[in-house]
Amino acid sequence: MKLLGCSLKNFKGIREKTISFRGDPQGDPRPLTAFLGENGTGKTTVLQAIALVLSLATRKGRILRVEDFPWHGFLPERLSSLGPTEVELDVAFGEDEVRAVRELYELTRGRPGLTREEIPGSHEEVRLVFREGKLESPQGPDGLAQFLGRYYIQVMQKQDPELRNFYRRVGGVFWFDQFRNLVTRSGGEWGAAEPGGWSAGVERLREYLVVWWSYHVSSFPHGVDYIPDLEKAFQNVFPDVEFAGVQPRNVDSGGGIKDSLFLLRKKQRVYDIAEMSSGEQGVFPILYEFVRLRIAKSIVLVDELEMHLHPFQQQVLLAALSRLGEDCQFVLTTHSPYLEEVIPDSCEVRFGGES
């Protein structure tokens, strides 16, 4: 799944804007597109438009209405403040992804818990049109059904764990906003805030990591070992940090999941995930979600990639993106001169006062 182009009319503060994501006017989609410009020029708003429409199409996190969209700072009642809103997205599908979605449809058809859908089509390109709060496509219902691959897996994977093997073949949309940190939800397919705030988010994430570590060190594996992939991804950005394992919170703790710390080591310093630097906290949720959700062939949106990172680490993270998920397309915002230095001109979209 790759984004080819988008067109917005009256979306929040943007009256009209069209952006191409092709390498040339009729070429393949770019793997990287960077929105550059000052604050308030509409960069994040365009990301929100893309995320909203693709989330409705893919039923990401069971998002079925505009009101369900959980991006921080997005107010549904302000969506059409300039007039009737319309968003069009052109999306390309690879041959294997088309086949995989159709296979998933056949494997899950008739299962309880799934709404009966149109048979997915085999269109190379599908246009999504969001108008008057509704989503449609000139390619018809079968074109819309092509976006439901990850939805089929999410709904049915508990009944049929083997369906998870399809994650590497079907795409979705994933976003990381300016407020990403250890509060990111760890149970759905979006980056919404964890109920209970930062502390609750850290506790929940730590519990997942403690369980992952138990799978990692077990002599009798009883779950997927995500630790090597997560540590490798983290070391691509922070090469001097390694995972140090699990430790009881105190001598009187029972050693259960909630009674344990998940430790990292940087040179002589050992620290829990709650004690990460702000830069580490900004990066960790991205890497964690890529590993946990097996993100591939997807459209990934990152607002302010450089957040809380030193200049060198900003460039290292940018270079590491292509290694995070197989065949993903990244759309990011930045106003960092250090990233602008290394982003090819052909991948830049500059925002000014035209929004």
Image (cartoon, grey):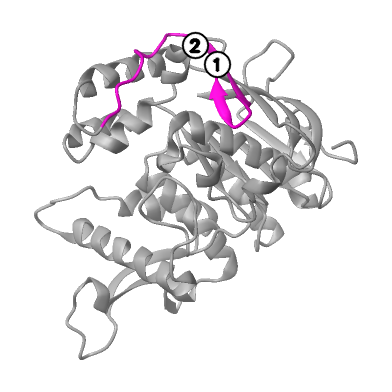
Say whether residue 253 is left or right of residue 22.
Answer: left
Q: Residue at x 54, y 45 (%)?
A: 67
Say whether residue 225 is left or right of residue 7.
Answer: left
Give percent across and percent down for residue 64: 46, 37
In the rendered view, tell whether residue 272 sits above or below residue 224: below
Q: Residue at x 74, y 13 (%)?
A: 25
Mark sitting on residue 137: 1
What kind of residue is marked 2?
Answer: Gly
Q: Which residue is mark 2?
A: 140
Element marked by disc 2? loop
| Outermost residue to the right | 353
In magenta stretch: residue 124: yes
The reply to whether callout 1 and callout 2 are in contact (CB within 8 Å) is: yes
Q: Image quarter for residue 231?
A: bottom left
Say whether residue 262 is left or right of residue 183.
Answer: left
Instruction: State the extent of the magenta-drawn residues as a range.
Output: 114-137
Q: CA distance from mark 1 to mark 2?
A: 5 Å
What kind of residue is marked 1?
Answer: Ser
Task: Tell me the crowding category of disc 2: few under 14, some 14 to 19, or many 20 or more residues within 10 angstroms, Cα based.
Answer: some
